[in-house]
Amino acid sequence: MMESGFVLVDKARGLRSTSCVNTLKKALGRKIKVGHAGTLDSTAEGLLILLFGRMTRTSRYVMALPKTYEVTATLGFETDTLDSEGKVTAESVGGLSVKESDVRRCLFSFLGWICQKPPRISAVRIGGKRAHVLARAGEALSVPERPVYVSSIGLDGFDEKHGTVKFTIACSKGTYVRSVVRDMGRMLETYATVAALKRTAIGPFRISDALSLDALGKDSAGSFRRPKDLAEAFPCYEVPEEMLQTLKSGKAISPGRLLRRHWGICEDSGTVVLAGSGVLSFAKCLKLQEETWFKPETNIYIGEEKDAYP
């Protein structure tokens, strides 16, 4: 069985991400380390990437990949959690007067870089503590705004009678869809909350290729992804044999001496993958003495085969 790699899981609504991790641990055996690359709330469903073996060290790089979500929002009220599981904290008085054209214009305004205030019930740290811990303890807190990027957002459907909005959004790491829905409702001079949320893509990886939890717990080894499959998500360069020792020692390498394999999907993250015989290195782009260099950060050893990255 593969000792290091990752697997795409289709998490069902109502299920905790840790349940998926535990199922994979059971399937692989306790000696193999397992982790996730970004959780999904129990109220959400969709794509979850689980890492195992040495690939658990790549979690932060996977988490940096852009995500795509399918969202259903209900207009007219807002909850403390900004989703349907929370307690109603505000309601519109006297019915809705929102038109489809209003919703389209509103969604369009979220495109590009925006300043977003994360929900009070979130994993954002404030003074070293999670915001949701402070909020549930009844402490007064103000979650600071931060920049996030929305690369696309489009209306999929609007039910004017019931105030239901369906849209798809592709966004950067750190974007809270619940905050997008909250802000959409307020911009429409009403309130809104998330009724359903499904993550359909993480970088180049799609929900259509994911396993259900039941399948994960059975003989699913044939669906596990190899470490080098993750290189598809980032700009990737091949390191020649004579430079492997430089790579393994963590020294900066000039891109002029490398062969570029592909651009990847996350070309603006500042991370590149350097691939050589038996090793994948996640490296940062640096500017040294007016030149660009790649500085290895995390090396993943995947064996000594010559075609580690064919």
Image (cartoon, rainbow, N blue to C red):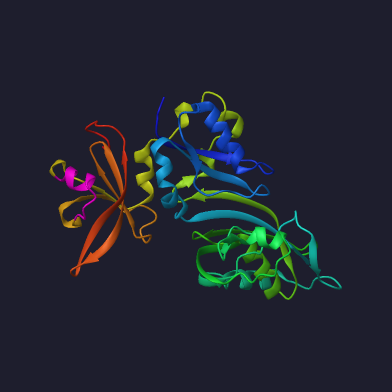
The part of the image, by quadrant, that contains residue 74 is bottom right
Q: Position of residue 210 (x, y in %)?
A: 53, 38
Q: Which image quarter holds the C terminus?
A: top left
Q: Is residue 245 above or below residue 136?
A: above
Residue sitting nearer the eye, 303 or 215: 303
Residue 82, visible in the rendered structure: no
Span of residues in magenta: 243-253
> Which residue is at 66% across, 47% downward?
42
Q: Position of residue 15 (x, y in %)?
A: 66, 41
Looking at the rendered structure, the number of numbered marks drawn on it comes to 0
Q: Nearer the viewer, residue 135 or 113?
A: 135
The residue that appears at 60% across and 49% down in the rendered structure is 40
Whole-percent x, y for residue 297 in the image: 31, 52
Does the segment drawn in magenta span residue 249?
A: yes
Query: Which quadrant holds residue 242?
Result: top left
Between 208 and 10, the one lying in front of the other is 10
| The magenta stretch spans residue 85 | no
